[in-house]
Amino acid sequence: MSVESEPTAAEAIFGSRITLARQFTDALAQQGEERGLIGPLELPRLWTRHVLNSAIIAPFFAGRVADIGSGAGLPGLVLAIARPDVEWILVEPMERRVQWLSEQVSELGLDNVEVLRSRAEDWDRGPVMDAVTARAVSALRTLLPLTAPLVRDGGELVLLKGANAQNEIVAAQKQLRKFGVDDARVDIVGEGVLSEPTRVLRGTIRR
């Protein structure tokens, strides 16, 4: 299958960082299926469904952010490209994916990224992150124990979700209370800019 042409919105979203975004997207298109990072059906929607879907939430972050289950670098690497002023920690347990992430960090010259081979459950640095993000990892009620403990008091969860996001909030009320997540809500981002707007589940940690 052929790779999706770069949408016109890409340059507006990435600005001066568009060259790095193109370099990453090209590398993912060329190596992603072979290395088990993306499926073959993703090439015709690589920009729209994956890269821009991740990049559109870049304005939500500041300080230090962890991406749980970074995989191919969606959203962590994409966000690190878009926001060089933010410190990113990409947490990924699988060796082959860690190798890919490390290669891309080096090739793209991203000095604002740390790749950490670890399960989120094994995080031992305490609640020190200003925000935690994740994409396509699991349902909210199972994702909360992996993300909320990493966030400082007053920090935020910024989780990329699908059409069922609001129902996930309803189903996770007990876990939201347990982990001190306040004002859990779904924001729709990119309407009028992206052909497929991004759903973001956000909540503030209150301890």
Image: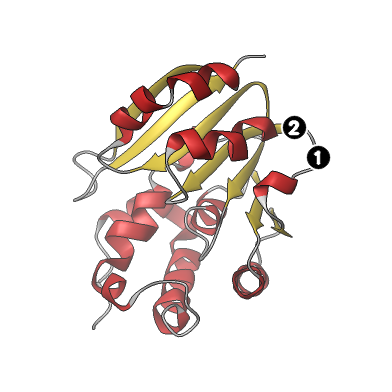
- For the residue pair 129 and 164, the one nearer the viewer reads as 164
Quarter where residue 205 is shown: top right
Relative height, residue 18 to residue 198 (above, below): below
**Residue 186 location (% of width, % of height):** 34, 28
Residue located 64% across and 54% down the image:
90
Please state if 127 lies on the left or on the right of 57 as rendered.
Answer: right
Residue located 24% across and 59% down the image:
8
Residue located 26% across and 74% down the image:
41
What's under tag 1, amino acid-wise? Arg
Q: Residue furthest right?
A: 125
The quadrant of the rendering that contains the C terminus is top right
Q: The residue tagged with tag 1: helix, strand or loop? A: loop
**Residue 55 location (% of width, % of height):** 42, 50
Give the numbered dot on residue 125. Answer: 1
Q: The residue tagged with tag 2: helix, strand or loop? A: loop
Mark 2 and mark 1 residues within 8 Å of each other at the beta carbon: yes
What's under tag 2, amino acid-wise? Val
- For the residue pair 132 and 19, the one nearer the viewer reads as 132
Give the numbered dot on residue 184. Answer: none
Q: Is residue 180 visible?
A: no
Say which residue label 2 marks: 128
Mark closer to the observer (2, 1)? 1
Please state if 62 lies on the left or on the right of 159 as rendered.
Answer: right
**Residue 38 location (% of width, % of height):** 40, 71
